[in-house]
Amino acid sequence: MSRRVRAALIWGGLGLVLFLPLFAALDSPLLAYRRPVYIAAGVAGVLGLMVLAVQPLLARGVLPGMSLLQSRRVHRWAGGALVLAVVAHVVGLWITSPPDVIDVLLLRSPTPFSIWGVAAMWALFASALLAAFRRRLGLRLWRQIHRGLALVVTGGTVIHALQIEGTMAPLSKAALCFFAVAALLWAVTARNSAQRPR
């Protein structure tokens, strides 16, 4: 198999896993008569999960057509986009129903999925904040903290998404969640002698 064909298959498969849940969510009958801000909040959540799923691959620099340096640069930008997606998700839900969001943030919500979403959100914010100080922390300590927070972010987000019976189709959502977890576990445990410091 040629390198170009292999690259096309990888990107095609990745695109399928990432975008099928988004298309399914946008086509959901549950969006009928919903306010635009509610729809935007839901889409932001789906986009955040999509970005989260590809982040480990970017961190490891394994996607075809990108050098390790380019891949990690995209990883950092994608991390910023992930934070914005989460903020948009929460703000959109706040506009739709402020009391519900307050209960979630204060851990008073009766819905189990909300706890996992809040845990993932704060872990993400902590990771983004610590990224600004990664040089002061030292490379080894930064990687350990970053990986630990990534496990909380991904685990919390996946449980949050799977417990919600919303616009995302069950099968495509489950496939994306499985991919996100598998990619992270591989990135955390795999050994790569060619890996260079960020």
Image (cartoon, grey):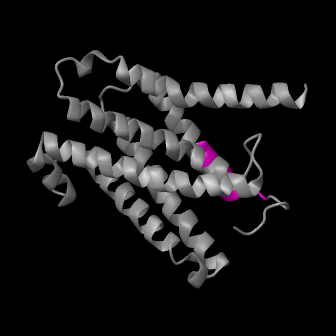
* The furthest residue to the bottom: 136
Answer above or below: position of 100 versus 2: below
Quadrant of res 119: bottom left
Q: Position of residue 160 (x, y in %)?
A: 36, 44
At horizontal 72% and vertical 31% (from top left) the residue drawn is 10
| Left or right of 38 on screen, residue 45 | right
- Number of disc labels: 0
Q: Quadrant of the C terminus?
A: bottom right
Name the foreground residue: 73 vs 139: 73
At horizontal 75% and vertical 46% (from top left) the residue drawn is 66
At horizontal 59% and vertical 43% (from top left) the residue drawn is 54
Name the foreground residue: 71 vs 142: 71
Q: Is residue 77 magenta?
A: no
Residue 198 visible at all: yes
Q: Position of residue 23 (x, y in %)?
A: 44, 21
Q: Position of residue 33 (x, y in %)?
A: 16, 19
Span of residues in magenta: 182-191
Per the picture, the main secondary structure of the magenta-coloured stretch is helix
| Left or right of 197 on screen, residue 3 | right
Q: Quadrant of the N terminus?
A: top right
